[in-house]
Image (cartoon, helix red, strand yellow):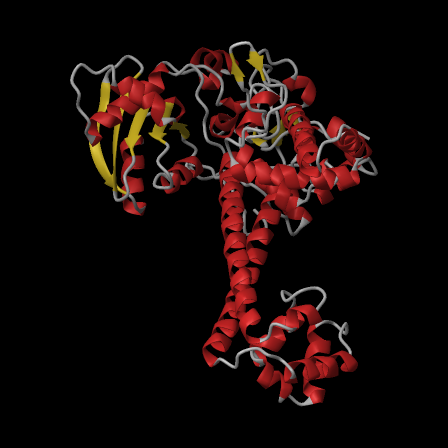
């Protein structure tokens, strides 16, 4: 189908029984483009006719109640997933970004649809995650389902258990065990092949990371997968007459919980990207904490060996020139014995010409007069600590590069906010996930822990309280950092910050209010899929 030029690409083959979704790719020749024409998408006008309140969480995509698709060809045809900025520019011509978001239908649709009726249901399923069964039946003839099949999976570290029941309560699959590997996953799929894939709903409890691989596998196979809150299954388990807790019983409990839910959320490829962003963002925070701890340790070691050096370098110890010097000469005695030319060149190269030969002479004299201890044990700790810090720096670069790649692919409207970069934006989106989990901005504010706490007793009501600081600590950290950047890059937020400061509030107090304002803006932008428009 064309040369794939991106590592995060899944190929699509229309001849296969189970087509795979192309998330993004680049075609190499015009001939390939011609061969891949005939794909369809729904326009905004078509989507506006839909009576269902459903929205795709990433793009506010609404399935059209009309059966009239719009055919496209050329560069836009055959591209499953968002068309990149180059393609959009080529198709739309010299149109501004704002106008393209408002007028270009390809900006509102995450996936393209093949015109084959046999595979259309597989492509449409991710967008029907909020639709009840009766809505699916009347949406399209191809989606008419006489019976739903609920598959409950009890997750464990080594082995999983699964069972299936029908919407009528009939046991279709007795509980069976399958391993947490490729053979076990294939066994599960082989058990489900006898049923209509469009009628199958698979559910499993949220159990840390043990079920992530299975979820990714099933989503790639285009199954409808739901991750249930264990609180819901616990309530269902209490309805049993006998107090029994086994892996086999839990499979039926999960399946019955699926059956009783009115609004099921199916995992999509967008959700998988948000899971990656969340994991990377939290791993980045842990890595930064490790690096900070090592820097504090390094400062302690240098204070014992060469206390005068921290006053010599005005920018502090933690810079490339100082690290290069201490790795080669971790004690003042070694620095004092270095050849002047070598010392000057070492500082000049690692500081990009910032340090001169005269400064190198001053440093050498300072090392000769140092009162630090000439301890080889501490010198070893200095060199090893610096190497660990540099290792963490390289790891952070890789983490941030991956987060940037995911953010560029999803092309979220949050990136139109001035002052928000790919890293802060990725951490915010990863923690939020599906914005439609929050029916109003106050719930999102509480989830971030930025909501004010309440203190009331008798006739007393506290007028001023601190933020609750409950919920996602990572999200709160990212929002506060983003708020400060937005204040420095946007006039509206700057005026709001200045107004809070004029009231006598501290910098961090005013910044917390700006973060709360930013939360409401982000909720509106993600809910309605609109760009930032505050001047």
Residue found 64% across the figure and 13% down from its top: 49
> Which of the 4 image quadrants contains residue 413?
top right
The x, y position of residue 183, in whole percent, is 28, 45
The answer to whether residue 62 shows anywhere in this view is no
The x, y position of residue 125, in whole percent, is 48, 26
Residue found 34% across the figure and 30% down from its top: 204
The relative height of residue 264 versus residue 386 in the rendered view (above or below) is: above
519 or 128: nearer the eye?
A: 519
Residue found 66% across the figure and 51% down from its top: 29
Q: Image quadrant for the C terminus?
A: top right
The relative height of residue 55 versus residue 388 in the rendered view (above or below) is: above
Viewed as shown, does residue 134 lie left or right of 27?
left
The x, y position of residue 347, in whole percent, is 70, 77
The answer to whether residue 362 shows anywhere in this view is yes
The relative height of residue 18 versus residue 289 in the rendered view (above or below) is: above
> Which of the 4 image quadrants contains residue 526?
top right
335 or 203: nearer the eye?
A: 335
271 or 533: nearer the eye?
A: 533
Viewed as shown, does residue 405 lie left or right of 150?
right
């Amino acid at each position: 189908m064309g040369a794939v030029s991106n590592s995060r690409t899944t190929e699509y083959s229309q001849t296969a029984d189970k087509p795979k979704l192309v998330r993004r790719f680049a075609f190499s020749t015009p001939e390939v483009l011609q061969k891949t024409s005939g794909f369809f998408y729904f326009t905004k006008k078509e989507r506006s006719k839909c009576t269902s309140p459903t929205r795709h969480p990433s793009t506010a995509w609404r399935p059209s109640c009309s059966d009239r698709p719009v055919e496209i060809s050329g560069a836009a045809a055959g591209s499953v997933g968002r068309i990149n900025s180059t393609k959009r520019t080529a198709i739309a011509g010299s149109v501004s970004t704002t106008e393209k978001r408002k007028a270009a239908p390809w900006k509102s649709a995450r996936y393209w649809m093949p015109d084959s009726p046999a595979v259309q249901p597989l492509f449409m399923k991710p967008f029907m995650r909020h639709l009840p069964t009766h809505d699916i039946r009347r949406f399209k003839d191809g989606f008419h389902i006489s019976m739903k099949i609920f598959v409950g999976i009890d997750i464990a570290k080594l082995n999983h258990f699964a069972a299936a029941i029908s919407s009528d309560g009939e046991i279709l699959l007795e509980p069976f065990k399958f391993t947490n590997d490729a053979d076990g996953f294939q066994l599960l799929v082989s058990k489900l092949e006898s049923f209509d894939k469009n009628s199958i709903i698979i559910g499993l409890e949220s159990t840390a990371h043990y079920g992530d691989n299975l979820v990714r596998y099933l989503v790639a196979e285009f199954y409808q997968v739901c991750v249930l809150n264990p609180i819901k299954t616990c309530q269902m388990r209490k309805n049993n007459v006998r107090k029994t807790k086994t892996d086999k019983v839990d499979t039926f409990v999960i399946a019955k919980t699926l059956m009783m839910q009115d609004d099921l959320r199916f995992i999509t490829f967008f959700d998988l990207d948000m899971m990656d962003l969340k994991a990377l963002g939290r791993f980045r925070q842990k890595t930064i904490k490790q690096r900070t701890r090592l820097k504090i340790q390094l400062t302690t070691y240098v204070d014992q060996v060469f206390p005068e050096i921290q006053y010599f370098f005005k920018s502090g110890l933690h810079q490339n020139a100082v690290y290069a010097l201490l790795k080669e000469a971790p004690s003042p005695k070694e620095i004092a014995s270095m050849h002047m030319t070598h010392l000057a060149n070492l500082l000049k190269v690692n500081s990009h010409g910032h340090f001169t030969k005269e400064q190198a002479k001053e440093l050498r004299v300072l090392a000769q007069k140092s009162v630090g201890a000439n301890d080889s044990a501490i010198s070893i700790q200095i060199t090893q600590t610096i190497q660990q810090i540099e290792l963490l720096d390289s790891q952070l670069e890789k983490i941030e590069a991956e987060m940037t790649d995911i953010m560029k692919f999803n092309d979220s409207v949050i990136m139109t906010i001035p002052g928000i970069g790919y890293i802060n934006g990725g951490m915010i989106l990863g923690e939020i996930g599906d914005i439609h989990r929050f029916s109003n901005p106050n719930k999102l504010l509480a989830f971030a822990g930025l909501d004010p706490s309440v203190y009331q007793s008798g006739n007393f009501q506290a007028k001023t309280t601190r933020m609750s600081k409950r919920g996602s600590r990572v999200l709160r950290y990212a929002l506060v950092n983003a708020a400060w950047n937005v204040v420095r890059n946007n006039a509206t937020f700057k005026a709001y910050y200045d107004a809070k400061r004029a009231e006598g509030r501290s910098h961090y107090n005013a910044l917390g209010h700006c973060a709360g304002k930013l939360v409401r803006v982000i909720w509106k932008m993600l809910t309605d899929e609109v760009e930032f428009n505050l001047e």
